[in-house]
Amino acid sequence: MTLTMRLERDPYPESPEEFGNLGEIAYNARSRYVLGTESVGSERMKEIAHKIDSGEYIGMPVFAYVHSGGTIKAAYNNPFDCPWDSGQSGFVYIPVADALEDYERRKMSKKLRERVLNILCDEVETYNMYLTGDVWGVIIEDERGKTVARLWGLYGEEYAEQQGSRLLKEHTNERESTASTVQPARSDSPKSN
């Protein structure tokens, strides 16, 4: 039996806010778009910027490009080409005290700060996948079109393809091992008289 895999966009993806992220993605409350996990006013935005600069928070700017939808990216300078439809939308950050507690440390090292910042950037990337509809489901079907397995909520098309291939291989191996233990009757075997 032949199995096939297909990818579909997840029509009801779970927001990355539900994942228990390390940090927050603060964005301007006046925005018409939800561009992060924490909607803040201008005073709070200034406070976050000051606390990042002072070292009380670990974080960096987040930029948005909004034109028929939105996309965000953590960067120190605007990574988008269009100056009219893009600009800084906020910050991704975590208080140093919270990071130390999460990692069960007493003191912030340069290596830990780097690690935390990388995780914060990954969280922005995941949230961007959610914003742009880059969340997928994998469906494994037999030759009759019957669903054998499915897996939803996969962030990033490449990751979804990897997980789909793994699932396809797993179910193919499962079917092959089942088929090898059961010997089908052959109709072309000689009949004894």
Image (cartoon, rainbow, N blue to C red):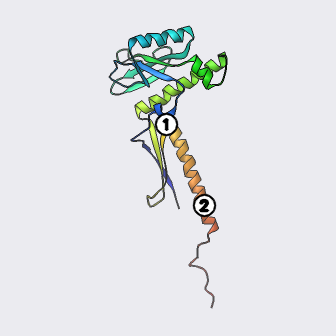
Residue 155, numbered label: 1
Q: Is residue 56 visible?
A: yes
In the displayed structure, does residue 151 sit left or right of residue 104? left
Q: Nearer the viewer, residue 19 or 148?
A: 19
Q: CA gap, disc 2 to disc 1?
A: 30 Å
Rendered residue at 51%/27% (across/down): 123
Q: Residues within 10 Å of mark 2 (few under 14, many from 20)?
A: few
Q: Position of residue 103 (x, y in %)?
A: 64, 25
**Helix, strand or loop for disc 1:** strand
**Helix, strand or loop for disc 2:** helix
Rendered residue at 46%/29% (across/down): 127
Q: Which residue is mark 2?
A: 176
Q: Residues within 10 Å of mark 1 (few under 14, many from 20)?
A: many
Amino acid at the residue labelled 1: Tyr
In the displayed structure, does residue 160 sit left or right of residue 177? left
Ranked by sequence position, the earlier of labels 2 and 1 is: 1
Query: Where, by quadrant of the figure, is residue 7 drawn?
Result: top left
Residue 87, numbered label: none
Amino acid at the residue labelled 2: Glu
Rendered residue at 59%/21% (across/down): 99
Count up the numbered dots. Answer: 2
